[in-house]
């Protein structure tokens, strides 16, 4: 059986903040026990409303922020326990594509310098070899080597995201965590970047963890989807099952809001009452219960366990 490339177990990230007149310490449960498995070559998406903890999960997986608890096994090794050369190697294999390429590209450096920097940091190649790699990579993402001496502000949003992708790929990683990589772009450009990412996935045997609030984008790119609510994953399934038979009431509500390009489609939109509660003060039991139209007594007191509805379709809900 294929071994997972990435296995996340009980990943937790709590932030503390002091609030109120007496500066009382509050614990914000941004990520609260996330489990996730990603196999080589897959695209797994994490989807959920803003503030659900999906970006924090991505950053904890890359150890850009230190998790509070849990394991992140990359090729079987817990990256939380790595240091020195082993950690550098894991970092090389796991790269991030940011939402806002403009903010993530140093405005004072040319594109050539931006792409060469990761190679220098990891001690790869001579200057001439690095230049060759940079020229090759810029063309792979659909730009030209004549553009390498330009600065980020001279490019459009879509071109800047191509540069962000080139920077992530220059070290030839195995896993890319893409955090809302197209949400800052026009719809027509979004499709181009998603198609580029899919082409690159085939060419470089990449595995993607794709983070997005946009269910239409997620449908386009994913093999499997994990739905996240208030720091927890509440449903995981392959894309077809999740979009055709959503089981968790939160997933059903999210999907009911996605426009379907079919004039005969008559499904009712499920309106979610209220806002997502604060992760500093999560509801008891099932944290979705104050907004759930199927809420039962048990939901208010007891957190639901995982149930397997079908092969690989996991749901955290008390409903039978
Ligand atoms: Fe709704 Fe209860 Fe299921 Fe939570 S456990 S989603 S409150 S039915």
Image: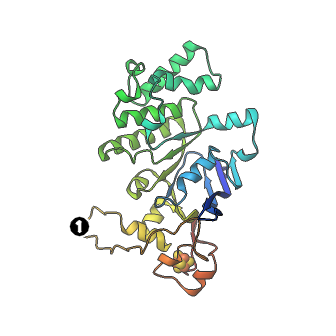
Q: Residue at x 68, y 34 (%)?
A: 89
When the figure is inspected, residue 204 is found, relative to residue 278, above or below; the finding is: above
Residue 76 visible at all: no
When the figure is inspected, residue 17 is found, relative to residue 105, above or below; the finding is: below
**Residue 223 percent coordinates (x, y):** 49, 54
When the figure is inspected, residue 67 is found, relative to residue 285, above or below; the finding is: above
Image quadrant in which you'd find residue 83: top right
**Residue 111 percent coordinates (x, y):** 45, 24
* Residue 21 vs residue 116, the one in the foreground: 21
**Residue 310 percent coordinates (x, y):** 56, 70
Q: In the rendered view of the protein, which quadrant contains the C terminus? A: bottom right
In this figure, which residue is indicated by the disc labeled 1?
Answer: 263
Image side of residue 268 versus residue 149, left or right: left
**Residue 28 percent coordinates (x, y):** 61, 61
* Residue 196 vs residue 17, the one in the foreground: 17
Q: Residue at x 33, y 75 (%)?
A: 268
């Amino acid at each position: 059986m294929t071994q997972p490339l990435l296995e996340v177990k009980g990943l937790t990230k709590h932030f503390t903040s002091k609030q109120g007149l007496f500066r009382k310490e509050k614990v914000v449960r941004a990520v609260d026990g996330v489990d996730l498995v990603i196999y080589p070559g897959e695209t797994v998406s994490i989807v959920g409303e803003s503030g659900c903890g999906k970006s924090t999960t991505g950053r904890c997986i890359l150890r850009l922020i230190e998790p509070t608890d849990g394991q992140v096994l990359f090729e079987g090794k817990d990256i939380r326990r790595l240091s020195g050369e082993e950690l550098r190697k894991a970092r090389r294999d796991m790269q991030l594509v940011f939402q806002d390429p403009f903010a993530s590209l140093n405005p004072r450096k040319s594109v050539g310098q931006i792409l060469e920097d990761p190679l220098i940091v990891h001690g790869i190649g001579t200057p001439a070899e690095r230049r060759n790699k940079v020229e090759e990579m810029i063309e792979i993402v659909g730009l030209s080597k004549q553009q390498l001496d330009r600065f980020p502000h001279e490019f459009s949003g879509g071109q800047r995201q191509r540069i962000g992708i080139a920077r992530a790929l220059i070290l030839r990683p195995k896993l890319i965590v893409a955090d809302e990589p197209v949400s800052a772009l026009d719809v027509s450009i979004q499709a181009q970047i998603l198609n580029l990412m899919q082409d690159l996935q085939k060419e470089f045997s990449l595995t993607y963890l794709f983070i997005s609030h946009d269910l239409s984008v997620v449908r386009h790119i994913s093999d499997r989807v994990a739905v996240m609510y208030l720091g927890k994953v509440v449903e995981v399934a392959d894309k077809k099952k999740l979009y055709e038979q959503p089981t968790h009431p939160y997933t059903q509500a999210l999907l009911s809001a996605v426009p379907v390009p079919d004039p005969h489609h008559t499904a009712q939109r499920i309106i979610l009452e209220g806002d997502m509660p604060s992760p500093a003060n999560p509801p008891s039991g099932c944290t979705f219960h104050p907004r759930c139209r199927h809420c039962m007594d048990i939901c208010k007191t007891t957190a639901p366990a995982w149930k397997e509805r079908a092969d690989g379709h996991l749901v955290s809900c008390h409903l039978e």
